[in-house]
């Protein structure tokens, strides 16, 4: 059995003090939902204060990006070791990074290598744009994203990876992907390449999330699907509604 996994992607929201206030609001109500692995992916500046707040909590903490070099002259970048002082997770390859910050499949792979080798757990995002979807390129695009993201990633590191299927057209739009359709895409374009690259056994333990306009009201539709193990939540992760989503996963 794969443990359900719900991560909040806070994006560029919340100053350090606002982040503490949100954690203090959510944490007590999430405390008894231990059957779900819960992770807050906060802005870099909130990692230290939120880590202090979560010291005695099973809730995990993560960042939203990581550079592939260990250190050096890379102005503005953050290394895996810097994140690891405070958190255990990092989101890699989110569509907003791909769209606005020139992230490519190759840089996703480099970040995956660096993060996993340093000991971070990775939430790697894949998904097609509206245009690709309309041109029926979903399978081709996601299969390519998957193959390159996992290039040269050792089987022994897969236990530290969670994959998120996030159709770009569903992110922040309120137009969530139909749950059965999302399950089908996860099965045939995410789990299948994992089987091809690593074998049947690897896919059995691999957790795959759905992300894109997940709400308290629709979360359950995803969680009852056999190939979906949880959600990557954006907008609703900043509200008490996040508790409803975790409850649906529990
Ligand atoms: P959303 O964002 O839940 O606001 O659609 C999801 C994400 O970007 O991970």
Image (cartoon, rainbow, N blue to C red):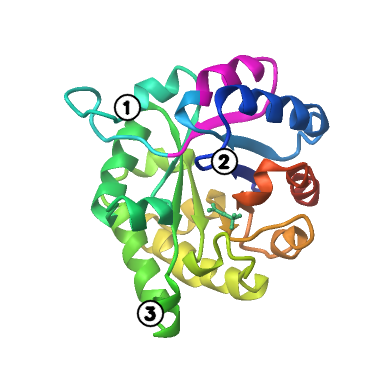
Give the residue pinned by disc 1: 79
**Could you say whether the residue bearing mark 3 is in a helix, strand or loop?**
loop
Question: Which of the marked residues, 1 or 3, is nearer the chain's N terminus?
Answer: 1
Tell me: 104 left or right of 138. Answer: left
Q: CA distance from mark 2 to mark 3?
A: 29 Å
Give the residue pinned by disc 2: 10
Look at 45% across and 17% down and name the residue there.
85
Residue 201 position within the rendered picture, expressed as x and y whole percent measured from the top left? 49, 53
**Could you say whether the residue bearing mark 2 is in a helix, strand or loop?**
loop
Look at 78% across and 33% down and name the residue there.
30
Give the residue pinned by disc 3: 137
User: Along the line of sight, which residue is nearer the eye, 202 or 173?
Assistant: 173
Tell me: 239 left or right of 125. Answer: right
Judge whether 121 appears above or below 81 on screen. below
Q: Is mark 3 within 8 Å of ligand 1?
A: no
Proximity of marks 1 and 3: CB atoms separated by less than 8 Å: no
Judge whether 116 appears above or below 135 on screen. above
Question: Which of the marked residues, 2 or 3, is nearer the chain's N terminus?
Answer: 2
Question: Which of the marked residues, 1 or 2, is nearer the chain's N terminus?
Answer: 2
Look at 47% across and 25% down and name the residue there.
45
Q: Nearer the viewer, mark 2 or mark 3?
A: 2
Look at 29% across and 34% down and name the residue there.
67
For label 1, the crowd category at 10 Å Cα-Cα, with few meaning under 14, some 14 to 19 and many 20 or more, is many
Range of the magenta residues?
Answer: 46-64
Tell me: 103 left or right of 28. Answer: left
Residue 18 position within the rendered picture, expressed as x and y whole percent measured from the top left? 63, 27
- Membership of 44 in magenta stretch: no
User: Along the line of sight, which residue is nearer the eye, 205 or 233?
Assistant: 233
For label 3, the crowd category at 10 Å Cα-Cα, with few meaning under 14, some 14 to 19 and many 20 or more, is some
Q: Is residue 35 visible?
A: yes
Residue 175 found in image quarter:
bottom right
């Amino acid at each position: 059995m794969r443990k359900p996994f719900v991560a909040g992607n806070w994006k560029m929201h919340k100053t350090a003090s606002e982040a503490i206030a949100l954690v203090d609001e959510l944490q007590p109500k999430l405390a008894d939902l231990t059957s779900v692995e819960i992770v807050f992916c906060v802005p870099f500046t909130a990692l230290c204060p939120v880590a202090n707040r979560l010291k005695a909590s099973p809730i995990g903490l993560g960042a939203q990006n990581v550079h592939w070099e260990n250190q050096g002259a890379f102005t503005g970048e953050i290394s895996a070791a810097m994140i690891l002082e405070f958190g255990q997770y990092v989101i890699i390859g989110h569509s907003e990074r791909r769209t606005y910050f020139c992230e490519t499949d190759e840089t996703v792979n480099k970040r995956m290598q660096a993060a996993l080798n340093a000991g971070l757990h990775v939430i790697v995002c894949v998904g097609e744009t509206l245009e690709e979807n309309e041109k029926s390129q979903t399978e081709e695009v996601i299969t390519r994203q998957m193959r390159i993201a996992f290039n040269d990633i050792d089987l022994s590191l897969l236990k530290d990876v969670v994959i998120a299927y996030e159709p770009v057209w569903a992110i922040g739009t309120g137009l969530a992907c139909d749950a059965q359709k999302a399950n089908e895409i996860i099965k045939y374009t995410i789990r299948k390449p994992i089987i091809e690259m690593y074998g049947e056994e690897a896919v059995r333990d691999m957790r795959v999330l759905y992300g894109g306009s997940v709400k308290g009201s629709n979360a359950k539709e995803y969680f009852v699907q056999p190939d979906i193990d949880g959600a990557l939540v954006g907008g609703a992760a900043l509200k008490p509604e996040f508790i409803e989503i975790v409850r649906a996963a529990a």
